[in-house]
Image (tube, rainbow, N blue to C red):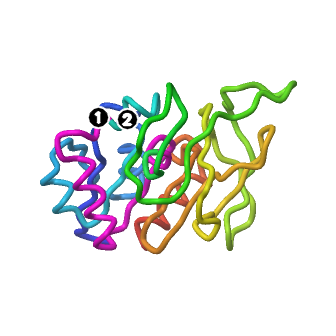
Amino acid sequence: MRGASVVIVDAGIGNLRSVQKAFESLGARAPISGDPEAVLRADRVIVPGQGAFRDGMKGLGAGLGEAIVEKIRRGTPYLGICLGLQLLFESSEEGGACAGLGVLRGRVRKLPISPPLKVPHMGWNEVALGGRSAAHFYFAHSYYAELGDTGDGWGTCDHGVTFCAAVRRGSLWAVQFHPEKSQRAGLALLGDFLCS
């Protein structure tokens, strides 16, 4: 990992500084950039995000989306956080149908309202990640990814429905929760990504 180029993608949709601070606490230099060329040069790509799917796709215009897809195609380690996971899918029903990057099969759907649980799903919840002991991570979302390929699923969570909390396919990692806000368990996951 020493000397590796890690870029946090600025598509105008994220809590970028908190993600950057989490990586810095692990000893990694992780500059923030909205330049597609910087993304194409990076050894690792992180796409954090919060907010609406359509705004996220708009933020990936001007070459950023293409650069991200190309890096994933090349096998460059990728970490998507929250909206950075959802944008990988074919479409979202949020705000009317909207096409995503199409890297993963499936669509993004609204969490069902299931009293007494509330939507948005905000706060700590247990996640069972493949090959790890279950841990608690911090969530803030109203939509979730419905997988087209169940083999991409890496972790699940329950909030009125059992939903995909994490996907993993080779060097592609993506999580619905916020590891940068999830204390020890989140930092451990980010550290594992850096060493992958």
* Left or right side of 4 for 156: right
Residue at position x 76%, y 25% from top?
Answer: 118
128 up-or-down from 65: above or below: below
What is the secondary structure assignment of the residue under circle 2?
helix
Instruction: Name the residue beneath numbered marker 1.
Output: 59
Question: In front here: 20 or 149?
Answer: 149
The image quadrant of residue 93 is: top right
Question: In front here: 130 or 191?
Answer: 130
Which disc number belongs to residue 56?
2
* Left or right side of 68 for 139: right
User: What amino acid is labelled 2 in the image?
Assistant: Gly
Pointers 1 and 2 in contact (CB under 8 A)? yes
Percent of width and height locating residue 126: 75, 49
What is the secondary structure assignment of the residue under circle 1?
helix
Residue at position x 78%, y 43% from top?
Answer: 161
Q: Which residues are magenta?
A: 58-86
* Left or right side of 159 for 94: left
Question: In front here: 85 or 15?
Answer: 85
In the image, residue 149 lies in the stretch drawn in magenta: no
User: What amino acid is labelled 1 in the image?
Assistant: Gly
